[in-house]
Amino acid sequence: MIPAKFNYIKASSVEEAVDLLDKHGSDTKILSGGHSLLPAMKLRLNRPELLIDISGISDMKAISEDGDEIVIGANCTHKEILNAELITSDLNILAQAAETIGDIQVRNRGTIGGSLAHADPSSDYPAVVLACEAKIEVTGKKGDRTIDASDFFQGIFTTALEEDEIITAIRFPKVNNGNYQKFYQSASRFAVVGVAAVKNGNEVKVGVTGVADTPYRATAVEKAYNGNSDAASHATDGVEVMADHFADADYRAHLAMVYVKKALEA
Amino acid sequence: MGNFIGKSVKRREDARFLKGAGKYTDDIKLPKMTQVAFVRSPYAHAKILNVDTSAARNANGVVAIYTADDGCGQYGVPCGWQVNFKNGETMREPMHPLLAKDKIRHLGEAVAIVIAESLELARDAAELVEVDYEELPAVTNPRDAMEDGAPLVHDQWTDNAAFDWCIGNDRAEVEAALEAAHHVTEMEFRNQRLAPNAIEPRSYIADYDVNADKWTLYTSTQNPHLIRLLLCAFALGIPEHKVRVVSHDVGGGFGSKIYHYTEEALVTWASKEIGRPVKWTSDRSEAFLTDAHGRDHVVTSKMGFDKEGKIVAHLTDEYCGLGAYLSTFAPAVPTYLHGTLFQGVYTTPLIHLNVTAPFTHTVPVDAYRGAGRPEATYLLERMLSKAAAEMNLDQAEIRFKNFIPPFDGIEQPGYQTQVALQYDSGNYEETLKRGLEMLGYEDFRKEQEEARKNGKLLGVGISTYIEGCGIAPSAVVGALGARAGLYEVGHVRVQPTGKVSVFTGTHSHGQGHETVFAQFVADKLGIDMDDVEILHGDTEQVAFGMGTYGSRSLAVGGSAIIKSVEKVLEKGAKIAAHKLEAAEEDLEYAEGKWTVKGTDKSVSFGDVSLTAYVPHDYPEGLEPGLDFSSFYDPANFTYPFGTHIAVVEVCSDTGRVDLKRFIACDDVGNVMNPMIVDGQIHGGVVQGIGQALLEEVVFDEDGQMINASYMDYAMPRADDLPMIETDRTTTPCPHNPLGVKGAGEAGAIGSTPAVVNAVVDAVAHLGVKDIQMPLTPQRVWKAIQN
């Protein structure tokens, strides 16, 4: 469990980190909490030449209110998210998801920005980000831009981030009628199925993680819903369902229905 | 009961463990120490076409690189048990080379050892070793390994069998009884392969001292002397007195640290080659691939019953995987540690077990907590509960009908089984009665009925197990193929001031010997526990020993210590009699002093000890000193038993099992320290629950282990478990001085079938008769759907 040799620079500002990314190119990795990256490096599955540590950039650590929105700095740990009063009161669905991530050690170190950028298809946040229609704020060499959640996840470990871009914050609308439901894998406790539902009267927005190689909005469910949780039967419509030794495609599709229903009824 | 025996004395060793101050092998750093990285095969079965180490040799910090073409290529590690074929043909025993030559036979087998100035440099250099492989088809399932045309693990033989074996009554007689039985219950299942997962990985440091021409081997092992013997006499051929084996704290083993591994011999060999200390510590990935695995039986079984539900006959055929090579105790596990327990706690009159034990393209399989006995118990206890369901009998009732009646082994003789053993003492029905009371069985069945009406799936599972431990009389195990004796050594050295150092050949890897052994020594000598120290884990401190496994430390190792304590008291009495000017037979010993009966004239243990070492006024002809060593070879195995009961709720939507209650009423004979026994039971129960619900080594068709990390290999966590409710009955062992039986494995033996029986009970009304382990949510859900 010894990583290959790498260089390390601790960035003190977003600009510095972006400059470094731009300068060093594709063999560079951004380090925040390190809870996905470092294990992969120790197994030498990932061997960047340079790590740019952004964990010390303090203006990426805030959780603040901006009108009807809550802006969460990318460096916020899962623990900080699940303990933030602003989030438990006005965005509790995110705290619910954060609470199910890993274990205490992971929650103390892992960050929301790191998790989203890593885009593990079984991670928890994407379901919530999708259902809340959050926006991912990023900074790159060409400046700042905002990526809609629905555009952000592009495949297994793949996002809409350009090589020189860093997630700086995630902008959520306040959500009071949402919930996250998860069926975890017994070894890693990642989601076999994770479902976030945000209800507004007879309308619902549903984000699903763990089921396909890309987290998705269950639009078929949303269309069929109209206040009736039987819409859950459309949980995997048009989706290619993943299979592994914990859950084959049939079982996973069934779980998706069960957990969408739970989320719709919660 | 004395001042300490039977008390929950807190563990002495915990102060250092809880402070992070334990001394594990990897904590040791020696001057000039080098570090090892192995080049390991990414294939389960392959030809090695070429190994090119030239680039690696030139890498920064590399001290040496060896392959099978170097001197170490001639050596292999031995197997310690021989089980011959039924037809008398000798067990097939392939060379288990320290490094693979020409052929890879399991995933992770080492091809080269890279020794460098640091671990980082060793890892970097190991990546530069280029090995050309030609991948070959692999077989990992033991039944598939015996199919015609299966890939051969060892080309020198015509099939993959290492041996076959049977035990019990004549097969034809058993088959005839099954034919005539009122009801026959059948099952086919896999007792799945498990990875042992000691939290401290294996770690070895060999330090060759050229001036003394002598090695010190620091090793994380359960049996230092056995390692020295196997290493010196059978692996490397070096004089035994030239090797000192030291094993400080060991962080778990569960059997996996009994064995002498190739890496251990290789670092020893390499240390002399380079004249520097050589250290290797396994990482978790290597542990999954190279620690000996457990279980791996494919089972087909039939059990016949009369119309009352009494067992009339039992016939089982098994394929038991051994892996690519024979690990130290491997042949004993699916045979003498397994088939001999097929009597269970029942009066079954006819039993036959037939075992075929093939090589497979996997890491070796050997003893893992319970070793053969969990596999036997799982089979019997599932069969009984399945039969009960089929015959409309209650799970408890069918057991009460079949129990061997109580016997104490003193007034009533031991119970002779159909499968070679004689049980020492037992009161099997009592633990079940207690267990049912603890549960509130009648009430539970009502609750279950109500729950079913509301669509809730509640189930209860019972398991009434027996195991054989404290292994065992040397003459008996020798006749069964063991290549070593299984006695133990206990040495009691009374210091001049009356303080006592006890040396034991057993070795704690978490059991708490330093506490428990001091408890009974202090009581037997009538002195304070603080005056007794327990020492182990150094072959130059302890005369000899066979180590810790098979729940033997207290029953065998403790008995050896008692023998020495008795010798101390016997000699002490002679000195005391001299000092008191009385006849020895007029003395009595209590509370640390010899007193002349009926008087207040006495002399203390400390006074006598001092006199023994300052023998100015001393009995004529008596040697000075108070220092005794004893070998204890037990008269029989010991046979702990008990009842485990699980209560589960199954989620009908997902198949996930929620373990609501777990009750363990065990009988481990006399108990020295109830807290430690409870801890052992808890730990064992949790490992057994792990097998029932979570754990399984999974290979794909190429022989790749697809879950070789904690991201994919599911171990039980605290939040998977209820509080474990324990109670005990006490049926002392009649043949050892402390009356103890052993508690280390019982939990893992009894719990697995209890949990599976409970899950099957929860969904039985939906037509489910059996579910394969581990009972993952997917498997349970699919069973319900079908």
Image (cartoon, rainbow, N blue to C red):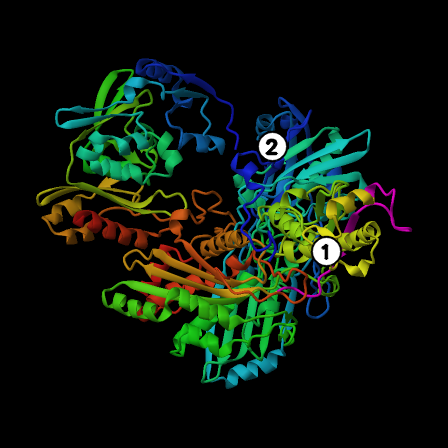
Residue B51, located in which quarter of the rendered image? top right
Same chain, labels 1 and 2: yes
Q: Residue at x 30, y 21 (%)?
A: A165
Q: Which residues are magenta?
A: B613-638
- The chain carrying label 2 is B
Q: Is residue B84 visible?
A: yes
Circles 1, 2 touching at the beta carbon (< 8 Å)? no
Residue B602, relative to residue B439: is it above or below?
Answer: above
**Count of all numbered marks drawn on residues in the image:** 2
Between residues B274 and B394, which one lies in front from this camera angle? B394
| Residue B589: numbered disc | 1
Neighbour tally class for label 2: few under 14, some 14-19, many 20 plus, Cα within 10 Å: few
In the image: residue B420, left or right of residue B449: right
Q: Amino acid at mark 1?
A: Tyr
> Residue B536 — which label?
none
Picture residue at 34% right of the left edge, 55% below the top = B656
Inspect the image, locate mark 2, and give the three-letter code of the amino acid beneath it. Asp
Could you tell me residue B133's position as x and y percent?
Answer: 59, 41
Figure check: B8 above or below A59: below
Image disc number at residue B27? 2
